[in-house]
Image: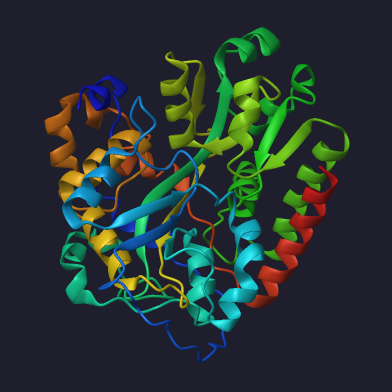
């Protein structure tokens, strides 16, 4: 508890209409008729959780306090793996097993909403047993109604995500003479050539470039294929001329830490955690003046998972308001759990002051969610972005 308070973290509460928008997604249709694997949870108290890095509470001994509590309360042993670097690369590793309904080596994992939609629409996810997740009642109502999972019967939001500009405060000031980047052109300063990183998550990186161009990324009549390709041209030019040095998934944080990059399009919670690890506010995070992107990662249970009930107990645990508050106070992302705000404020009343992780409606108005793509757009957009990634 002392560790949590000194982190001075905060959590997010109600996201209202913005949450409903961020969770709207589309994916290729055509479900495959797969059968769920036999659940051996009753006889085998084990669970494998595959997740992104910097996405769970960690104490000074390198242990995971909430997972330790879960294991003690349930008797279920959890193998926790930080092997989810970005959605496309993870899907590339497991798509063949998913298509056959085979075990992917994880009983539960957390793809971003648009990728969760793909898994669900292709028939790759098991349907939850609601009786095993009574705390689902604590889900923020705004997260219901997703086109790919209207009743949240196959996915539950783990955390909400904000993307914007991250930067090494001292190095950025020395290179540019400015305190912080405000607009996209600030990342294109000649003094930052070769020291800029962007996310391999297409919807965040291209989304921020589109918003800088005045495109409303949540609206089909604004985010057209022509607009998208214009943004791709901007990114491609910055890669070819050496301004952008790296396009990475979660490993982008390593480049910030070792100084290879000075500024990057990045995720808010990661930066707050990196500061906690550094022991001081080395890095800054801001939303661009044109706005940042918002999305969410979701719990799903793959069709080949053999510990379904154990995975449901894990979800139920993290949908308890107190446990959700403890988790969010570390990871510094928006929690989807009603009542977590009040629990977090018991830890530290100052938690509610951080807009990055406890956003007001006014703050959320500065964010946009990338609209749902049809299958043709998904293929065209992904192909164009992949071409740039290969050249970075």
Position of residue 356 in the picture relative to residue 382 (left or right): left
Q: Residue at x 29, y 53 (%)?
A: 336
Residue displayed at 55% across by 54% down: 216
Left of 147 or right of it: where is 263?
right
Q: Estimate the x, y position of residue 129 in percent, counting from the top left.
A: 25, 77
The residue depicted at 37 percent of the width and 68 percent of the height is 155
Vertical relation: 50 (above or below) 125: above
Considering every residue shown, the one lying at the far front of the view is 43
Q: How is the image coloured?
A: rainbow
Q: Is residue 326 left or right of residue 82?
A: left
Q: Position of residue 37 (x, y in %)?
A: 43, 81
In the rendered image, residue 150, in percent from the top left (x then y), is placed at: 34, 76
Name the residue located 49 percent from the left edge and 34 percent from the top edge. 287
Q: Is residue 186 visible?
A: yes
| Along the line of sight, the residue nearer the viewer: 307 or 247 | 307
Instruction: Indicate whether 326 appears above or below 203.
Output: above
Give the farthest residue toward the bottom. 33
> Which of these two is toward me, 277 or 159?
277
Q: Position of residue 93 (x, y in %)?
A: 65, 63
Front residue (pair 47, 16): 47
The quadrant in which residue 315 appears is: bottom left
Figure label count: 0
Toward the right, the furthest residue is 241
Report the side of 79 relative to 185 (left or right): left
Q: Is residue 372 above or below residue 362?
A: below
Residue 11 can be seen, yes or no: no
């Amino acid at each position: 508890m002392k560790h949590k308070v000194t982190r001075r973290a905060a959590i997010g509460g109600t996201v209202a209409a913005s949450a409903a928008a961020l969770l709207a997604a589309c994916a290729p249709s055509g479900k495959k008729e797969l059968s769920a694997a036999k659940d051996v949870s009753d006889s085998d108290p084990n669970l494998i959780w595959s997740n992104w890095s910097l996405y769970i509470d960690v104490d000074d001994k390198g242990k995971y306090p909430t997972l330790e509590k879960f294991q003690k309360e349930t008797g279920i042993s959890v193998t926790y793996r930080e092997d989810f670097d970005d959605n496309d690369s993870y899907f590339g590793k497991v798509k063949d097993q998913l298509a056959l309904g085979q075990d992917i080596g994880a009983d539960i994992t957390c793809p971003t909403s648009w990728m969760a939609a793909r898994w669900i629409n292709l028939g790759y996810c098991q349907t939850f047993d609601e009786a095993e997740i009574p705390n689902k009642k604590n889900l923020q109502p705004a997260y219901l109604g997703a086109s790919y999972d209207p009743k949240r019967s196959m996915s539950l939001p783990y955390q909400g995500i904000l993307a914007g500009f991250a930067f090494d405060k001292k190095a950025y000031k020395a290179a540019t003479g400015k305190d912080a980047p405000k607009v996209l052109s600030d990342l294109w300063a000649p003094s930052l050539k070769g020291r800029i990183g962007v996310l391999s998550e297409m919807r965040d990186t291209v989304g921020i470039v589109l918003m800088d161009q005045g495109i409303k990324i949540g609206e089909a009549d604004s985010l057209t294929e022509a607009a998208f390709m214009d943004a791709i041209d901007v990114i491609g030019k910055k890669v070819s001329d050496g301004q952008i040095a790296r396009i990475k998934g979660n490993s982008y944080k390593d480049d910030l830490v070792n100084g290879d990059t000075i500024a990057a399009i990045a995720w808010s919670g990661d930066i707050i955690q990196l500061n906690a690890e550094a022991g001081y506010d080395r890095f800054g995070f801001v939303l661009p003046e044109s706005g940042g992107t918002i999305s969410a990662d979701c719990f799903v249970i793959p069709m080949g998972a053999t510990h379904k009930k154990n995975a449901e107990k894990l979800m139920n645990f993290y949908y308890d308001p107190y446990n959700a508050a403890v988790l969010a106070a570390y990871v510094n992302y928006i929690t989807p759990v009603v009542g977590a705000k009040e629990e977090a404020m018991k830890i530290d009343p100052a938690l509610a002051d951080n807009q990055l992780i406890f956003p007001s409606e006014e703050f959320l108005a500065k964010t946009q969610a990338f609209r749902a793509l049809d299958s043709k757009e998904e293929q065209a957009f992904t192909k164009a972005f992949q071409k740039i990634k290969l050249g970075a």
